[in-house]
Amino acid sequence: MLSSLVTALRTLTVLPVPGKDTETFSSSLFWFPAVGLLIGLLQLAIGYAGYLSGWNELSAALVVLGGIGLTRGMHADGLADFADGFWGGKTREAALRIMKDPNVGSFGALALSGMMLLKWVAVLKLVALGAFGFIAGGVLLARWIQVFLASSLPYARSEGGTASSFVNGAGWLHSLVTAFMTIVFLGALFHFDLFAVTVAVFTALAAGLSIGMLSYRKIGGVTGDVLGAGSELTEVFVWIAGAVYSHYR
């Protein structure tokens, strides 16, 4: 079981982790919410340090850049490839081919710049409102949505790929266990504010379902890039929803 945690940490973060990887990569999905919580708390801490300086704009920027640094920009790269493939490829085959290209095209660049701007604006509002729990909550839910998508849809590439070892073997048990873990973690982050938990979870599900349905229609399943894009969109949607909720509560 500890080898599954090692794989989850090595997959989702740049943190140096001793130990051996698990032989069944899908088993590491059980640890994705815990690793998401760790990343979220680190980003929260970075943001709070900036907040103490009285410079909210810097605090928000540190949260966004901290997330990129802690994950080596893996999910942002997935979003760029997703945008290039889905909007640049007219057919399933073209989309998959473009997504495999390591170069970033115009759609990917637009998606990345727009995402970073939205994240900064959302986090700036959360920092100003002191709603730091939503910062960590968005990061946590983004990793749970990866499990949700991997457990719900088949892998789209017949020849396999980087994420196929995670998607193949994932099933309802992964979704169920990680959903329970995620709700427990969110309860602690939001001081057991049931309405805040509900807002965050339903926002994440809306983002995940949207990406999932679009991906299934376009390429017949998911890839690593789809999981990364789902993570990025979930994160920013939860942050925006959290800012709106915290403003009007």
Image (cartoon, helix red, strand yellow):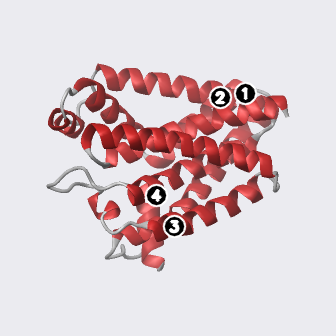
Measuring from the top left, give residue 160's x and y in whole percent. 19, 56
Q: Is residue 87 left or right of residue 192?
A: left
- Assess disc 1: are there few (<14), some (14-19) or many (≥20) residues with their C-alpha within 10 Å of its C-alpha: many
Q: Earlier in the sequence, mark 1 or mark 3?
A: 3
- Assess disc 2: are there few (<14), some (14-19) or many (≥20) residues with their C-alpha within 10 Å of its C-alpha: many
* SS type, badge 2: helix
Residue, disc 4? 147
Q: Are marks 4 and 3 in contact (CB under 8 Å)?
A: no
What residue appears at the point 20 percent right and 26 percent down from the top-left corner?
Answer: 90
Question: Which numbered tag is attached to residue 31?
Answer: 3
Q: Are marks 1 and 3 in contact (CB under 8 Å)?
A: no
* SS type, badge 3: helix
- The answer to whether residue 92 is seen in the rendering is yes
Residue, disc 1? 125
Mark 4–mark 1 distance (CA, rounded to whole Å) = 28 Å
What residue appears at the point 65 percent right and 31 percent down from the top-left corner?
Answer: 240
Q: Are marks 2 and 1 in contact (CB under 8 Å)?
A: yes
> From what the image shows, is residue 53 above or below residue 152?
above
Residue, disc 2? 122
